[in-house]
Amino acid sequence: MTGLRYVYAVCHPLGAPLQAALSGVAGDPPRLLTHRGLIAVVSHVPERDFAEEPLRRHLEDLDWLTATARAHQQVIDALTAVTTPLPLRLATVFRDDSGVRVMMEEREDDFRRVLDRLAGRVEWGVKVYVEAEAQESERAVSKPASGRDYLMQRRSRARAHEDAWQRAERFAGSLHAQLSAHADDARLHPPQNSALAEASGQNVLNAAYLVPRAESEEFVEMVDRTKGQEPGMRVELTGPWAAYSFVESAGEPGAVETGEGA
Amino acid sequence: MSMPSRMPEPYGQGGGANLADILERVLDKGIVIAGDIRINLLDIELLTIKLRLIVASVDKAKEMGIDWWEDDPALSSGARRNELARENAELRERLARLEELELGRAPEESRVLKEGRASKDGSAPKDVREESP
């Protein structure tokens, strides 16, 4: 099969083989394309699905998008187990191998710089939720008997929410400060929408931490210790991820999420 | 590059992170490279909508911090509008009753009152809502 080339990631040559029986997007096992001492991890994908027009159409299909995103992430995960990959954004597609080589040449300096910066590090995701139950009980009030009652209830509800929010902000803020101090770098991402994330409660902290592999165990234990520490708050840990949140060089558009937030 | 042998087991639900976590990263983070097949992910209508759903904007988060309860779906939904409508109907009714009482006592004055009210009738719901408690 010829087809198009779907690129997952760029990395240094692998020190260990990729896990066997790994199937990439469209079911084609990822291959390693070496160029100038770097490798691109690619799959062959059919033109009928990945040419511009069908790809655009597919991306509008949430089931297809989900399957493709999971397959993409599976390959990145497998790479993360053996090396430090630079993950590319979903659906980066070239006509043929030579297109991939040209791209690697053009971006070589950039790739090497970021690879050096990230070497031996992984990303951990930490989210804090204000539990839904806490919000519910505040909302469980009797029907207002009059306009005055209604407004008073509204005000007390507002005040209760304000308190919960401030408590959440304090907790999230101190957790973020503590974790940042034990990480090489950190990013604050916008909170996730609970409905789509299928998580209960209100997401108030959505952060990513860049942590050396060797210190990951300690980092995970630190996060675990904060679970259940603050009533009504839930702490969630995901990872280890490839350093998705830290691949952009300073000054590039993707780096703007840095800084203050939650 | 040396790899430490020990890494914590992956975290997340059932061995995999949730879909929002994955989409957030593969669609929104990661290195952007213009391939031969040019697709601007943000041009995709569904993606744009879904991304907005997944990732509430920072402005929104700030807004939630300032006026969190207003953002609460249970309060901003139809239920809340119904509540206000009911409240308004009730207040109008009470006002009408008061006017009738007033009418019995002092016809002159109440007509003025009534006219005054009639001219403001359209904005009455707004007045009720904005009245500070």
Image (spheres, rainbow, N blue to C red):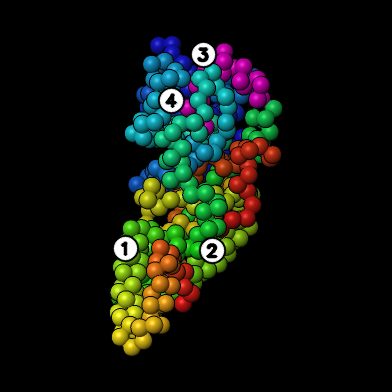
How far across and how far down the image is residue A169, in percent?
Answer: 54, 64
Q: Using the rendered view, name the quadrant where residue B104 is placed.
A: bottom left
Residue at label 2? B66
Q: Foreground residue, B45 or A207?
A: B45
Residue at label 1? B82
Give how far apart the Cα atoms at labels 2 and 3 are: 52 Å
How far across and how far down the image is residue A149, in percent?
Answer: 37, 78
Q: Using the rendered view, name the quadrant where residue B80 is placed.
A: bottom left
A132 vs B53: above or below: below
Of the numbered discs 3 and 4, the one sitting upstream in the chain is 4
Disc 3 and disc 1 in contact, CB within 8 angstroms: no
Within 10 angstroms of label 3, few (less than 14), some, or many (20 or more) residues?
some
Amino acid type at circle 4 is Arg
How far across and how far down the image is residue A123, in percent?
Answer: 54, 45
- Determine if the magenta segment contains residue A56: no
- Quadrant holding the N terminus of chain A: top left
Q: Regarding mark 2 in the picture, which secondary structure is present there?
A: helix
Q: Is residue A100 visible?
A: yes
- Determine if the magenta segment contains residue A100: yes
Is there one chain holding both mark 1 and mark 2? Answer: yes
Residue at label 3? A96
Amino acid type at circle 3 is Asp
Residue at label 4? A56
| Dot in front, 1 or 2 | 1
